[in-house]
């Protein structure tokens, strides 16, 4: 019988450890699904959809709750094809939005679509978590979720081991009593003494150290993995400029203020004289009992402008210290014009942008809905590389690729070829 108790003890420990690790892996996987779904949703879906309100397309949470996963997988992958095939459910779904047709996403895998569905079902974090989402976002949520899971598993493991140990001792006493062996009851000890005794057990110490390493390792891994990622970063600006009001409600084109994005590397921050093109006349007095809006007054103060006399005092001029939101490290070269002009068509197709949406939305998100601007995309190397891997280029009637093809033909013929023929004279090759 002693052998049986030892076997039970070993089997229970092994079974528990396998179960605990399985729960940990499944928990981490499910959390990552939601995070990945949030990332893909922000990149591909937010131009038309919100979780809980109608936009160009309908609110998604009620729809996802009412439709089967099988239908949603097919619908998101290629809705136009389903509608064209005459599928009754798809035809009915096409009536959700009369303004635009659902975009097909053939590049999304079933796993990615399931991640989107998981995110839509779970939704955004609560308001008190938004500050964390603004600074570190979903990555912090995953870290907290995973660490909580690890700690819970450790506590449950300890409780189960203690209960099993007591059960085994009880069975051993009963067996010895039936065999006529006198059982000496152990003296009762305090909790402190009992805990101290546990740490004298080599197996328990090994298990405790293993759990500690897993916990600290998970915390360190999550911390290092999310270092330098600023998705949702939303600093307080010296003037509360609303992109929602200007780009959304008033429909001001992005390049009116950020003209550099279409002709140079930098998008550029507009000078205050661009603001004054409108705000010499638009002063917001209707909303402030005949007084100038406080935020517009800040523009006047920076320029030394007297609105009553319409004069400037250069001695009162001072710069507006805007806080930069989007920032790449010095070793990363990014050219705005190359993306928003040369690559516009390819980027629009890859991100599923509507004709009335500027290509800027591909990276900066739905700026026309942002009361205060925040960093929408992670801007990491992986994020850029993933886009470069999946975006399909249109090389037809493109002067750049025509030049490359001509150079290749010269190489085939053995003719002289120089770096200049391959764009080697472009300023951006050497100069930032």
Image (cartoon, grey):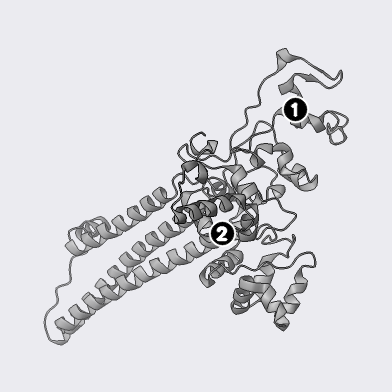
Q: For label 2, count other residues whose C-alpha is less than 10 Å away and answer few (under 14), some (14-19) or many (20+).
A: some
Closest to the observer, 268 or 301 = 268
x, y (%) of residue 306?
A: 81, 19
Q: Which of marks 2 and 1 is nearer the N terminus?
A: 1
x, y (%) of residue 178?
A: 16, 87
Counting the numbered discs, the total is 2
Q: For label 1, count other residues whose C-alpha is less than 10 Å away and answer few (under 14), some (14-19) or many (20+).
A: few
Query: Could you say which quadrant of the image residue 303 lies in?
Result: top right
Q: SS for tag 2?
A: loop
- Determine the residue positioned at 62% across, 49% down: 342
Where 395 falls versus 84 (above or below)?
Answer: above
Q: Identify the residue position indicated by label 2 in the image.
A: 391
Q: Identify the residue position indicated by label 1 in the image.
A: 273
Query: Could you say which quadrant of the image residue 73 lies in?
Result: bottom right
Closer mark to the observer between disc 2 and disc 1: 2
**Left of 27 or right of it: where is 370?**
right
Question: From this viewpoint, is residue 29 visible?
Answer: yes
- Image quarter where the N terminus lies is bottom left
View extreme (left): residue: 181
- Determine the residue positioned at 41% across, 57% down: 147
CA separation in Å, label 2 and label 1: 38 Å
Closest to the observer, 38 or 134 = 38
x, y (%) of residue 50?
A: 68, 60
């Amino acid at each position: 019988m002693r052998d049986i108790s030892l076997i039970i003890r070993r089997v229970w420990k092994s079974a528990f450890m396998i179960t605990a690790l399985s729960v940990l892996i499944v928990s981490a996987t499910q959390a990552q699904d939601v995070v990945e779904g949030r990332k893909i949703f922000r990149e591909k879906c937010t131009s038309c959809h919100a979780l809980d309100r109608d936009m160009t397309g309908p609110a998604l949470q009620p729809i996802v709750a009412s439709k089967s996963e099988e239908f949603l997988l097919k619908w998101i992958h290629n809705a136009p094809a389903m509608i064209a095939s005459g599928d009754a459910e798809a035809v009915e779904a096409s009536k959700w939005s009369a303004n635009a047709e659902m975009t097909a996403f053939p590049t999304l895998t079933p796993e990615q679509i399931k991640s989107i569905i998981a995110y839509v079902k779970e939704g955004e974090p609560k308001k008190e978590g938004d500050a964390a989402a603004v600074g570190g976002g979903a990555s912090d949520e995953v870290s907290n979720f995973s660490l909580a899971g690890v700690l819970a598993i450790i506590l449950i493991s300890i409780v189960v081991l203690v209960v099993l140990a007591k059960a085994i001792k009880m069975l051993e006493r009963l067996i010895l009593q039936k065999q006529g062996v006198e059982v000496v009851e152990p003296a009762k000890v305090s909790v402190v003494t009992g805990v101290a005794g546990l740490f004298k057990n080599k197996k328990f110490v090994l298990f405790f150290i293993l759990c500690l390493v897993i916990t600290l390792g998970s915390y360190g891994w999550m911390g290092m993995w999310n270092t330098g990622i600023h998705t949702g970063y939303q600093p307080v600006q010296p003037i509360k400029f609303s992109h929602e009001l200007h780009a959304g409600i008033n429909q001001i084109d992005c390049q009116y203020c950020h003209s550099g994005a279409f002709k140079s590397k930098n998008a550029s921050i507009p000078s205050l004289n661009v603001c004054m093109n409108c705000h010499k006349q638009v002063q917001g007095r209707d909303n402030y009992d005949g007084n100038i809006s406080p935020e517009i007054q800040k523009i006047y103060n920076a320029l030394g402008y007297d609105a009553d006399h319409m004069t400037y005092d250069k001695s009162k001029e001072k710069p507006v210290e805007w806080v930069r939101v989007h920032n790449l490290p010095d070793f990363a070269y990014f050219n705005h014009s190359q993306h928003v002009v040369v690559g516009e068509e390819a980027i629009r197709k890859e991100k599923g942008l509507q004709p009335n949406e500027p290509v800027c939305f591909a990276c900066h998100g739905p700026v026309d809905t942002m009361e205060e601007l925040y960093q929408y995309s992670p801007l990491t190397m992986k994020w850029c590389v993933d886009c470069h891997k999946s975006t399909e280029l249109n090389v037809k009637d493109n002067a750049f690729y025509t030049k490359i093809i001509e150079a290749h033909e010269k190489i085939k013929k053995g003719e002289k070829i120089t770096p200049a023929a391959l764009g080697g004279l472009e300023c951006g090759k050497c100069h930032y």
